Image (cartoon, rainbow, N blue to C red):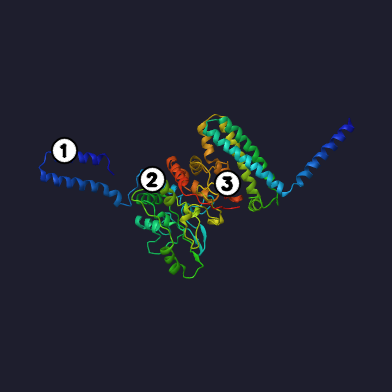
């Protein structure tokens, strides 16, 4: 019994260590790829929120807002110091003002939760009111100071 | 201005007219015309009179359709609206936007309506001094008189802010005395004002894009003379204001804007792009505005703008990598 516990502990510790190594060895290019994937998924979810709201489908709004809240949680860890490549549109200000950047990600999370919970009440008017300034206060408030704007319209 | 009281008056005059002789009729007609004119005068002749809610609303709407006169407010949270001080780097030096709040000493509170309109569309201060063409007076020259008057009413309704204008720093010798007047005469493209603002259809879209919205100031490339090159209208600018790459929004299938009319109108009214991204930078400022912005325009106007943008000649001009 004791031996099992010890070996389990050792196993878990080594798994943890491996995971830590894997994280530490992630290259800047991988970080950039991961966050661009996340942002793409995030944009898709935001688009789904708007389409859902236009169609009066508040359930779709709520589930996509939940996806957005989860995405937002992952943002700070995807921007470790030095994770830059030519492909990245991140501005150096992210690391000069990391606290502000992290706060913006937190705001995205909280606003997404607010949007999700409002949509869950089934009140279309209240949901649309949250949506109206959502993009500006969350995506926009972070993109303007921290992202080089895309010149091409997608 | 032609309210129920005027109607009553006209009815009285008409009743009287019917029982009078022909010569009196002529006099009475003159009298009624004069009465009518007099009744319309007070609103035009008393700048100090409180503006009506309708005038204010129209002015706020025009203010929004210009993008909220955003250059006149420093970027960032809580900056005083229209108080100026925004730094703008130009090829000839650095300028700072001016205070256009109704403060009498440091703003435009001491200017007459006519002086404000002249500055807005002709680029001249009351003392005759030229306003540098960083202020898009060449585009605003295409604004209808009625819209400008309403805009002035709204500007006067905003809180006055005491803030001295920051002096410009011109690095090109003889710029204002020699180069600028020559440039304005030879190269600058001036829009022409319509008698009245078009109210619907393609003409409305064109008016809002070219004059009020002054989209070309950022979206149209500039030639060697730094004047907007309208042969490539709205084809994008790789070196736009504040070092931004301004996209080509002509309907060119390869390098232009591929969004539908509805998508463009929705974007201008919300800041949301069809791909799930959200506007940022200067475009975000003009869409959301400080007090009002593009998004406060009616759906009909936003659609007219979108339809017009879809109708302009496509220009192949790749902006960015």
Q: Secondary structure at mark 3?
A: helix
Residue B146 in the image: state x and y as whole percent. 35, 49
The reply to whether dot 3 and dot 1 touch (C-beta < 8 Å) is no
Chain holding disc 3: A
Q: Which residue is mark 1?
A: B15
Q: Is residue A63 visible?
A: yes
Q: Would you say the residues marked 2 and 3 are in contact, meaning their CB atoms lie under 8 Å apart?
A: no
Mark 3 and mark 1: Cα distance apart in space: 66 Å
Q: Compute the Cα span from label 1 to label 2.
A: 37 Å
- Mark 1 surroundings: few (<14), some (14-19) or many (≥20) residues within 10 A: few
Label 2: which secondary element: helix
Q: Chain of mark 2?
A: B
Cβ–Cβ below 8 Å for labels 1 and 2? no
Q: Tag 1, which secondary structure?
A: helix
Give above or below for A3 relative to A153.
Answer: above
Question: Do the residues indicated by labels 3 and 1 lie within the same chain of the protein?
Answer: no
- Of the pair B268 and B55, the residue shown nearer to us: B268
> Label 3 belongs to which residue?
A141
Residue beneath the point at 60% across and 34% down: A64
Marks 1/2 same chain: yes
Q: CA distance from mark 2 to mark 3?
A: 30 Å
| Residue B293 appearing in the image | no
User: What is the x, y in percent for residue B64?
Assistant: 44, 47
Report whether A87 appears left or right of B171. right
Q: What residue would you read off at disc 2? A: B58
Report the front residue among B64 and A102: B64
Q: Position of residue B276 (x, y in %)?
A: 58, 41
Q: Residue at x 23, y 46 (%)?
A: B36
């Amino acid at each position: 019994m004791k031996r099992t516990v010890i070996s389990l502990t050792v196993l878990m510790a080594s798994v943890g260590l491996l995971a830590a190594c894997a994280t530490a060895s992630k290259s800047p290019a991988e970080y950039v790829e991961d966050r661009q994937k996340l942002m793409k998924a995030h944009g898709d979810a935001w688009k789904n929120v708007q389409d859902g709201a236009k169609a009066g489908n508040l359930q779709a709004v709520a589930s996509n807002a939940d996806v957005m809240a989860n995405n937002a949680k992952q943002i700070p860890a995807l921007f470790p110091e030095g994770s830059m490549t030519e492909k990245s549109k991140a501005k150096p200000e992210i690391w000069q003002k990391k606290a502000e950047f992290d706060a913006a990600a937190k705001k995205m999370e909280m606003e997404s939760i607010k949007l999700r919970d409002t949509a869950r009440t089934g009140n279309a008017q209240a949901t649309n009111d949250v949506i109206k300034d959502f993009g500006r206060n969350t995506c926009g408030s972070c993109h303007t100071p921290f992202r080089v704007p895309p010149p091409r319209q997608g | 201005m032609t309210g129920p009281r005027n109607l009553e008056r006209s009815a009285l005059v008409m009743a009287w007219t019917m029982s009078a002789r022909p010569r009196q009729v002529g006099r009475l007609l003159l009298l009624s015309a004069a009465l009518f004119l007099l009744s319309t005068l007070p609103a035009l002749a008393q700048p100090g009179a409180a503006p009506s809610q309708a005038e204010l609303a129209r002015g706020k709407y025009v203010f929004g359709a210009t993008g909220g006169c955003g250059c006149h407010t420093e970027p960032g949270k809580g900056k005083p609206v229209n108080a100026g001080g925004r730094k703008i780097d130009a090829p000839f030096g650095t300028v700072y936007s001016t205070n256009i709040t109704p403060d009498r000493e440091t703003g435009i509170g001491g200017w007459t309506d006519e002086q404000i309109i002249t500055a807005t569309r002709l680029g001249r201060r009351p003392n005759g001094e030229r306003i540098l063409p960083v202020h898009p007076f060449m585009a605003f020259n295409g604004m209808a008189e009625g819209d400008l008057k309403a805009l002035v009413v709204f500007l006067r309704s905003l809180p006055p802010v005491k803030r001295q204008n920051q002096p410009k720093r011109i690095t090109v010798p003889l710029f204002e005395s020699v180069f600028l007047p020559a440039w304005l005469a030879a190269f600058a493209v001036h829009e022409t004002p319509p008698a009245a603002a078009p109210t619907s259809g393609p003409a409305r879209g064109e008016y809002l894009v070219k004059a009020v919205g002054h989209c070309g100031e950022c979206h149209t490339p500039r030639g060697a003379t730094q004047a907007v090159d309208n042969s490539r209208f709205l084809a994008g600018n790789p070196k736009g204001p504040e070092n931004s790459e301004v996209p080509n929004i002509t309907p060119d299938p390869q390098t232009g804007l591929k969004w539908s009319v509805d998508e463009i109108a929705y974007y201008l009214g919300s800041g949301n792009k069809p791909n799930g991204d959200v506007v940022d930078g200067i475009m975000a400022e003009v869409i959301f505005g400080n007090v009002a912005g593009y998004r406060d325009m009616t759906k009909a106007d936003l659609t007219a703008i979108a339809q017009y943008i879809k109708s302009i000649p496509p220009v192949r001009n790749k902006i960015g990598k």
